[in-house]
Image (spheres, rainbow, N blue to C red):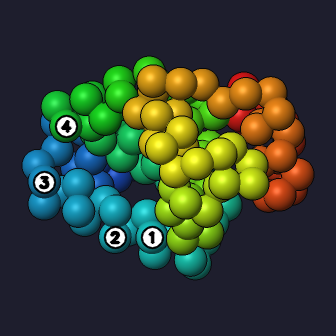
Amino acid sequence: MNTEMLSTVNSLIKTIPLFDGCPSEKEYEEALELSEYLFDNDPHSPILTMMIAKIEEYENSLPEMAEFNERIANTPAGVAMLRVIMDQHDLNQSDFENEIGKKSLVSRILNGERSLTVEAIKRLSQRFGLPVHLFI
């Protein structure tokens, strides 16, 4: 049984080099394509779960992703949520006058120079139907 399992694992690694670690960009792209296929055709596959973990590991090892992850980790929750809302609703800084104030204040909040007030958080939460804690 152990020999058969080792053979199966080795066969899987040959088929999906991402599982062996240190993949090339081409192998990474192939793994993305396979994971998309599995997601569409067999979303409960344990292979998909393992692939997602390996893809995430690979992406987090890239220098540009490390920088991005650090920037995200250092972004206050309220600012991150405000950016997501702006992106999802195709809004700009002028669209928050009723919730936050003038465009210049929204800009200062997005740049980390000011924080969202409790009142602004309540108004944003109400306008977009989001829990208050997402802004804190």
Q: Which amino acid does label 1 sit on?
A: Glu
Q: In the rendered image, which residue does mark 3 sit on?
A: 25
Residue 20 visible, this orientation: yes
Q: Calculate the distance from the C-alpha at mark 1 to the C-alpha at mark 2.
A: 5 Å
Q: In the rendered image, which residue does mark 2 sit on?
A: 33
In the picture, the quarter occupied by the C terminus is top right
Residue 26 at x, y = what percent?
13, 60
Residue 45 at x, y = what percent?
60, 59
Q: Calculate the distance from the C-alpha at mark 4 to the C-alpha at mark 1.
A: 23 Å
Q: In the rendered image, which residue does mark 1 sit on?
A: 36
Question: In this picture, is 42 found above or below 121?
Answer: below
Residue 101 at x, y = what percent?
65, 45
Q: Report helix, strand or loop for mark 4.
A: helix
Q: Which amino acid does label 2 sit on?
A: Glu
* Quadrant of residue 25 within the rendered picture: bottom left
Q: What residue type is labelled 4?
A: Glu
Q: In the rendered image, which residue does mark 4 sit on?
A: 64
Q: Calculate the distance from the C-alpha at mark 1 to the C-alpha at mark 3.
A: 17 Å
Q: Do the residues labelled 1 and 2 touch (CB within 8 Å)?
A: yes
Question: In this picture, is 12 found above or below 136?
Answer: below
Residue 20 at x, y = what percent?
25, 38
Q: Which of marks 2 and 4 is nearer the N terminus?
A: 2
